[in-house]
Image (spheres, rainbow, N blue to C red):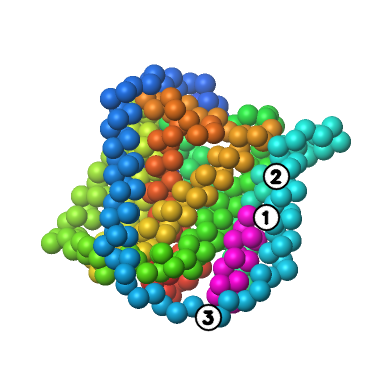
């Protein structure tokens, strides 16, 4: 469904499918709608509503007793190495030394490797362990899994063309190699950030035992969610302007609906019990990573640019300000993959 629905929608609309499968991808055959204040206001209400809901959950549950943490440990040496490595990578990403020119387009992976090491060191300082130290094999294999994961979103972007890359004009093989290396950091970064957020007192004391939502007919709700999400995913290539936000929401809802119907784990499974901690921590982890993605992208030679319909106006770095709302559901999509990979026998909401 995730792979077949978008091209099926294009074919049903009678459009040629060839341009969508060009490699390296093209970004010149979808024209986008101009800025629209009414649409901007609608999306602004949705985004601020999501953040307001998180604040509401926090306010309703923030006095809950926090589980005790182990005695703090010294910041590990490899964490300092991660900070030094990331700082040096940041310097080289934003400067233009002539002797560094051959390596200038390839600073994304070193930057995020430094970030991932630093986040794991912060977790280790608080807990005495971290994903990198407690599950090193699975954590390292999360990198190639992450590359596959983000290539899927690159695939969906072919149908809406909301972003494209500059400073990376390569042939097909080099493009695939360098892009795969960069994409491999997405899930390790978001997972590490989420695990770090779970060590913070203001999250550990809140978002549990509050506002349980129990559907009367969960199977029927899951079936309708699956049907509507599938329709949106099939339609993104037909109406890329109207349904561009479906790129971030539809895959998540399809996975959650299927997992719910088959009795599998999913990122929303704690909500009927009033456990929102997983939902909030994964969403905020992706939003925090999104800030650093966009900030570091702003000064890099090899970078991405956005062409988002209706809301392309106000920006923070290259990202339209309302585009940051897309990181909230994206975090839950990360959870649907990374959580089950790292903790196959543990509830997704238990972390």
Mark 1, residue position: 114
- In the image, taking residue 299 as reference, residue 188 lies left or right, namely left
Check disc 3 and report its element: helix, strand or loop.
loop
- In the image, taking residue 226 as reference, residue 191 lies left or right, namely right
The first of marks 1 and 3 along the sequence is 3
- Give the residue drawn at x 59%, y 47%: 183
Q: Start and end of the magenta stretch?
A: 114-130
User: How far is the residue under mark 3 from the one under mark 2?
Assistant: 33 Å
Instruction: Name the mark nearer the viewer: 3 or 2.
Output: 3
224 or 89, nearer to the observer: 89
- Give the residue drawn at x 66%, y 44%: 108
Residue 136 belongs to magenta span: no
The first of marks 3 and 2 along the sequence is 3
Label 3 Cα crowd, 10 Å radius (few <14 / some 14-19 / many 20+): few
The first of marks 2 and 1 along the sequence is 2
Mark 2, residue position: 90
- Residue 119, above or below 158: below
Mark 3, residue position: 70
Check disc 1 and report its element: helix, strand or loop.
helix
User: How far is the residue under mark 2 from the one under mark 1?
Assistant: 10 Å
Tags 2 and 1 touching, CB below 8 Å: yes
Q: Position of residue 2 (x, y in %)?
A: 40, 46
Q: Position of residue 341 (x, y in %)?
A: 49, 65
- In the image, taking residue 337 as reference, residue 173 lies left or right, namely right
- Give the residue drawn at x 38%, y 49%: 329
Label 1 Cα crowd, 10 Å radius (few <14 / some 14-19 / many 20+): many
Q: Is residue 233 visible?
A: no
């Amino acid at each position: 469904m995730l792979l077949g629905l978008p091209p099926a929608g294009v074919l049903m609309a009678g459009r040629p499918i060839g341009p969508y499968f060009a490699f390296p991808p093209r970004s010149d055959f979808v024209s986008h709608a101009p800025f629209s204040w009414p649409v901007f206001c609608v999306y602004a209400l949705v985004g601020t509503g999501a953040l307001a809901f998180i604040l509401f959950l926090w306010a309703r549950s923030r006095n809950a007793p926090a589980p005790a943490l182990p005695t703090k440990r010294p910041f590990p040496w490899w964490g300092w190495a991660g900070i030094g490595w990331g700082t040096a990578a940041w310097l080289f990403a934003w400067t233009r030394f002539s002797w560094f020119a051959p390596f200038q387009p390839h600073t994304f992976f070193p930057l995020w490797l430094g970030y991932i090491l630093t986040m794991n060191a912060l977790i280790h300082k608080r807990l005495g362990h971290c994903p990198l130290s407690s599950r090193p094999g699975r954590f390292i294999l999360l990198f190639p899994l992450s590359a596959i994961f983000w290539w899927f979103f690159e695939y969906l972007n072919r149908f809406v063309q909301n972003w494209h890359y500059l400073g990376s004009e390569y042939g097909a093989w080099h493009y695939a190699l360098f892009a795969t290396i960069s994409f491999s950091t997405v899930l390790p970064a978001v997972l590490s950030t989420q695990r770090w957020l779970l060590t913070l007192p203001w999250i550990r004391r809140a978002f549990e035992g509050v506002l349980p939502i129990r559907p009367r007919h969960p199977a029927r709700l899951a079936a309708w969610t699956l049907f509507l999400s599938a329709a949106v995913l099939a339609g993104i290539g037909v109406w890329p302007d109207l349904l561009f936000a479906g790129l971030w929401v539809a895959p998540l809802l399809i996975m959650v609906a299927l997992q719910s119907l088959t009795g599998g784990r999913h990122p929303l499974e704690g909500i009927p019990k009033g456990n929102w901690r997983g939902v909030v921590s994964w969403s905020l982890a992706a939003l925090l990573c999104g800030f650093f993605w966009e900030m570091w992208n702003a000064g890099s030679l090899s970078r991405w640019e956005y062409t988002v319909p209706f809301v392309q106006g106000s920006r923070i770095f290259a990202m339209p300000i309302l585009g940051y709302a897309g990181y909230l559901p994206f975090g839950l999509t990360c959870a649907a993959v990374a959580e089950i990979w790292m903790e196959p026998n543990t509830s997704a909401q238990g972390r």
